[in-house]
Amino acid sequence: MATVKEEPAEVQRLPSSSTTLTLPIIDICSSDSDSDDEEARAYLNQLLRQEEEKKERAKRLRVSADAAKETEAKRPRLGLDGVGVSMGSLPPLPPPPPVLAVELREEESVSASGSGVLNRISGGCKQFWKAGDYEGAPGAGDWNTTSVGMDHVRVHPKFLHSNATSHKWVLGAFAELLDNALDEVCNGATYVNIDTIQNKKDGNQLLLVEDNGGGMDPDKMRQCMSLGYSAKSKIANTIGQYGNGFKTSTMRLGADVIVFSRCRGKDGKRPTQSIGLLSYTFLTMTGKEDIVVPMLDYERSMGDWKKLMHSTQSDWDRNVETIVQWSPFSTEEDLLRQFNLMTDHGTRVIMYNLWEDDQGQLELDFEADKHDIQIRGVNRDEKNIQMATQYPNSRHFLTYRHSLRSYASILYLKIPAGFRIILRGKDVEHHNIINDMMHPEEVTYRPQPSADGVPRDSNMCAVVTIGFVKDAVYHIDVQGFNVYHKNRLIKPFWRLWNSCGSDGRGVIGLLEANFVEPAHDKQGFERTTVLSRLENRLVHMQKQYWSNNCQLIGYAQRRGKKAMPSKGEDSPDFHLGKSSQPKPRGMASGGPSPRTLNRKYVNGKVLNGRVFSKMNNGTTPTTKNGMESLSTIPSSSSDDDGIDIQTNGSNQKPASTDSACFTSESLVTDELKEENRLLLERLLKQEDKIISELQNKLESEREKNRLLEAQINEVEMKIEEMNKEQESLIDIFSEERERRDLEEEKLKKQLEEASNLVQELHEKIARLERK
């Protein structure tokens, strides 16, 4: 008879209100969007269901317990060594400890001087690449805690640092914040301001990034502080898509960030303003095992801002206390004063505890240029800085690695009308590197949908503008492609061709490739077949452009050296020159160029690996490697049989030699005429282009002359005024001298008269004394 062992029923007690404290902060790892009341009700309902199940199980156990006692008494008991043990010879097992409800204890305030905490965590480290050694407090972390019966995956504070290491280049973190501001143009943003302010608590530098976009309501603020939330991925013409940029960028620039955001009421809601603190220092100093974010929300009602509480007053006070203790502000009033510096909508991000380098200096340099933010260390090359003054057309290539102003000026292909990027009180001037080119050419590249795995879209293409930088005549090593994705610069001056000698120097290019996916840090692309094919094409373009034009900048012409065509060069996805160039007569759109066509078949011979396969009423050229036909060239009506030629390039007798010779010679003649016409057109266009460039230069010189003449006239007028002033001063001095001479003469006469009078008086006195 089977026995059922009776076990004591578990008793689960509800946490008492005197010992349980709710933590008034947002759990960043939770993805629940329900309110606190709904979660509490669900939790209580679950506890009640568990109590009922336990009562039923205890009842069933009591029914079978009596029947089991007799059988248990008759069966021999076995000890650990297999020997029978009689009942009652061993003491009874102690009852299991009661299961208590998990209590959320109130976090103790940990000051910066707490030696116990500092000994076990790395909160005091100020170097970014060494700040990830935090392992949490020993023994912390109760993994039995659940929410509504299901576990949440915790996010350790160390993940904030690990996640931010994707930005190996610190200026890439600034780009993420600029992207967020630019995406707010659709919500009315007209500027983004990057500046530095001083921490009133300790006097350190704070980094400020603010915009006047739509702002964030309390829900969006929580999504911003969480990981992976991104509503922008479904909105067209926005840069953000992963929901990770704000966390990685702010944590890369500093250990802590506080966000102030104000949002106008939408859809019948009232205006709100929110404050959120994401502090790596707070998490590590207090020994947290998961990421928590204290937040404060306010709502405008009856013309005043009132607290928007989601729980109790004690929770609110605890949030205020945490934010004030671990932020650059001393009181709640100081926090609210930040909103006085904002309009009725916008966001203000302040990063502090900025990272330092190995020498104990700030990683960011605010002193080199009062209107710029630069980087110290390996990204700063003093030689490049000196060269940038000598070669102004290559300034962005030489300075973008260490200068935020230089990098931000080329960060976007186009800036929305009326939008300003302000860096430390001065606007960043947008710059297009096409303006730095000379002898530019356009190359249109279309990815092949069947081979590259991209969607079939006839409008999907990349127009590559390639040319020499204007300083290329000095033979400086400047080259690379600026590759944009959806208006955002992903690869600045991407160097693909690393030749042994000086080949490729001075060649720069620009393109917008929306068919390749950027990496999550937006500083590179995902390694795919599409990207690999694009790299090959860009290398081929650079080689071909260099071989054809290197003599224009002082290098020896590459006569016997031609650029090797890349695989699929003659496909309709690759067009050299202007994409709007007219096609030769009788050729389909996207067919081979006349330069390659006139070398295909002369007197029954195959050239350049082109062959003609037999077709009805026409011939179709194919390549050696058996690629699909590219275009169909109609033949004459008398040549019904076509031309058969072996695909390995050897000669084969045509079906009709006379007809074939006549057809090929006439075709070659027509194509040579057409090519001659095209070359003439290109020459005329190039001549017009050169003339227009010279006219523009002449006009600019005339403008300079006009400015110089205006300056000379202004200087002459100033000189004339100064001469007049000088003359007037001379007149004044002359008058003053004459007046002084007259006065002096007058005084001399008076002195002489006085002397005579004194003499007379002396004589009178002498006469009187004699008498």
Image (tube, rainbow, N blue to C red):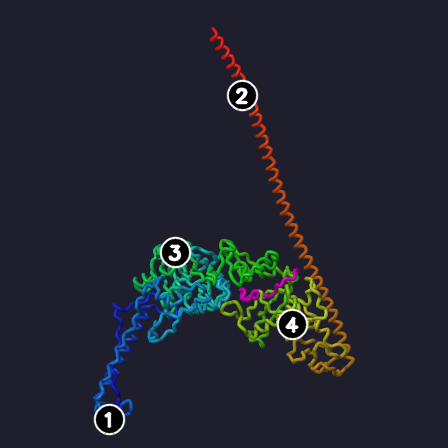
Residue at label 4? 590
Q: Where in the figure is residue 301, as x and y percent of width and height?
A: 35, 57
Query: Is label 4 in contact with label 1 (beta carbons under 8 Å)?
Result: no
Q: Which mark is residue 747?
A: 2
Residue at label 3? 201
Residue at label 1? 75
In magenta stretch: residue 481: yes
Which is more N-terminal, label 2 or label 1? 1
Part of the protein shown in magenta: 473-492
Q: Is residue 318 visible?
A: yes
Label 4, label 2: how far apart the Cα atoms are = 108 Å
For this rendering, which residue is in front, 105 or 516?
105
- Among the 4 quarters of the image, the one containing residue 499: bottom right
Q: Which mark is residue 574?
A: none
Label 1, label 2: how far apart the Cα atoms are = 151 Å
Disc 4 is placed on an element classified as loop
Which is more N-terminal, label 4 or label 3? 3
Q: Nearer the viewer, mark 4 or mark 1?
A: 1
Residue located 37% across and 55% down the image:
334
For this rendering, which residue is in front, 665 or 343?
343
